Image (spheres, rainbow, N blue to C red):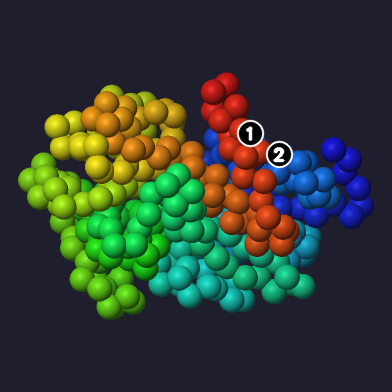
């Protein structure tokens, strides 16, 4: 890779940021398409968000991914924000177009594509979503739009209820909300076609946990666990053992990254290259 005076800069801001896979995926993609771009990770503290946005303008940084804890607080510093990102109050991608900053959220598109590209259709289906945090909000928006029915269960029930009400208003669809209690999970999983875990349960170092009892899995239930550390979670293993179709969380990561890449470069993302780079890195660490 040759860095020149014309090289365009993209990056990701967040705190912590050291474990991000975005530089790995995006630099591999830029190289594969021979694009004169580079991608870097910047550790930005909550108090530094406004300065980071000013810096993006001043340094003519082409694009940024935004991760925890800035996805909501960054919104007020942008010039235009996509409607879906406004509704879920979360931006994970910024495009700098002639010094105007446009905000988007590609997490929902990422989840949708991860399912569709792996053969899981949403039309006419019921989705059961576990979680109502940052990632879950973006996924819930996409599922409310594409699937026929949606139920949202969360440890903090109030948060699931607020999210369900917000999406009911946007999509004019009835959306159920509940807790992560065994009885709420059991009653909702029964008539669901797709289960998505968007809680952090099962993430290292607590990889021996799962939000769902294994006896509830069945072969005609598709599963996506957005946790990708470990690569195969307890939930994924148990669902697979019951014959369920399982989509890895890495897929959502790749497709959200691919959507950001396309926003910045206007080119079709080399998804296979991004997947390989992410998997190689995850297997190393
Ligand atoms: P992210 O940006 O990854 O979505 P987040 O916004 O902090 O992170 O959301 C984490 C999600 O995991 C939330 O739904 C959270 O539930 P609460 O809203 O009740 O906090 C859920 N979560 C985290 N730890 C959990 C645990 N031990 N049991 C159940 N749910 C948990």
Marks 2 and 1, the one that precedes in the sequence: 2
Asked which quadrant contains residue 237, the reply is top left
Task: Give the residue displayed 33% in from the left and 77% down from the top.
Answer: 170
Query: Could you say where residue 238 lies in the image, as x and y percent from the top left?
Result: 26, 28
Question: Pointer 2 and pointer 1: residues touching (CB < 8 Å)?
Answer: yes
- Image location (x, y in percent) of residue 63: 68, 58
Q: In this picture, is 12 found above or below 250?
A: below
Report if residue 226 is visible in the image.
yes
Using the numbered discs, state the Cα–Cα distance from disc 2 to disc 1 in whole angstroms: 7 Å
Quadrant containing the C terminus is top right
Q: Is residue 51 visible?
A: no
Q: Which mark is residue 11?
A: none
**Quadrant of the rendered structure where residue 28 is?**
top right
**Residue highlighted by disc 1:** 277
Q: Residue at x 55, y 45 (%)?
A: 254
Q: Which residue is mark 2?
A: 28
Few, some or many residues within 10 Å of mark 2 (<14, 14–19, 20+): many
Q: Secondary structure at mark 1?
A: helix
Number of marks in picture:
2
Left or right position of 139 against 164 = right
Q: Nearer the viewer, residue 161 or 185?
A: 185
Q: Residue at x 62, y 63 (%)?
A: 94
| Foreground of the two, 11 or 120 | 120
Q: Residue furthest top?
A: 284
Q: Position of residue 141 (x, y in %)?
A: 37, 64
């Amino acid at each position: 890779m040759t860095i020149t005076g014309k090289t365009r800069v993209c990056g990701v801001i967040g705190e912590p940021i050291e474990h991000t896979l975005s530089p790995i995926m995006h630099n591999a993609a830029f190289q594969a398409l021979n694009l004169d771009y580079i991608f870097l990770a910047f550790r930005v503290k909550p108090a530094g968000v406004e300065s980071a946005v000013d810096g993006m303008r001043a340094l003519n940084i082409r694009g940024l991914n935004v991760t925890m804890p800035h996805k909501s607080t960054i919104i007020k510093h942008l010039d235009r924000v996509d409607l879906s990102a406004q509704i879920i109050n979360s931006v994970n991608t910024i495009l700098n177009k002639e010094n105007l900053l446009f905000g988007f959220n590609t997490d929902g598109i990422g989840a949708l594509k991860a399912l569709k590209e792996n053969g899981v259709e949403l039309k006419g289906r019921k989705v059961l979503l576990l979680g109502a945090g940052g990632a879950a909000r973006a996924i819930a928006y996409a599922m409310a739009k594409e699937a026929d029915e949606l139920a949202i269960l969360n440890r903090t029930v109030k948060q699931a209820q607020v999210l369900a009400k917000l999406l009911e208003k946007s999509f004019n669809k009835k959306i159920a909300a509940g807790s992560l209690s065994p009885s709420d999970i059991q009653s909702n999983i029964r008539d669901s076609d797709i289960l998505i875990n968007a809680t952090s349960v099962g993430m290292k170092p607590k990889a021996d946990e799962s939000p769902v009892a294994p006896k509830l899995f069945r072969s005609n239930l598709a599963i996506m666990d957005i946790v990708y550390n470990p690569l195969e979670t307890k939930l994924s293993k148990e669902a697979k053992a019951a014959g369920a179709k399982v989509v890895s969380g890495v897929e959502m990561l790749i497709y959200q990254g691919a959507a950001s890449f396309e926003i910045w470069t206007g080119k079709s993302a080399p998804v296979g290259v991004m997947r390989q780079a992410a998997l190689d890195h995850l297997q190393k660490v």
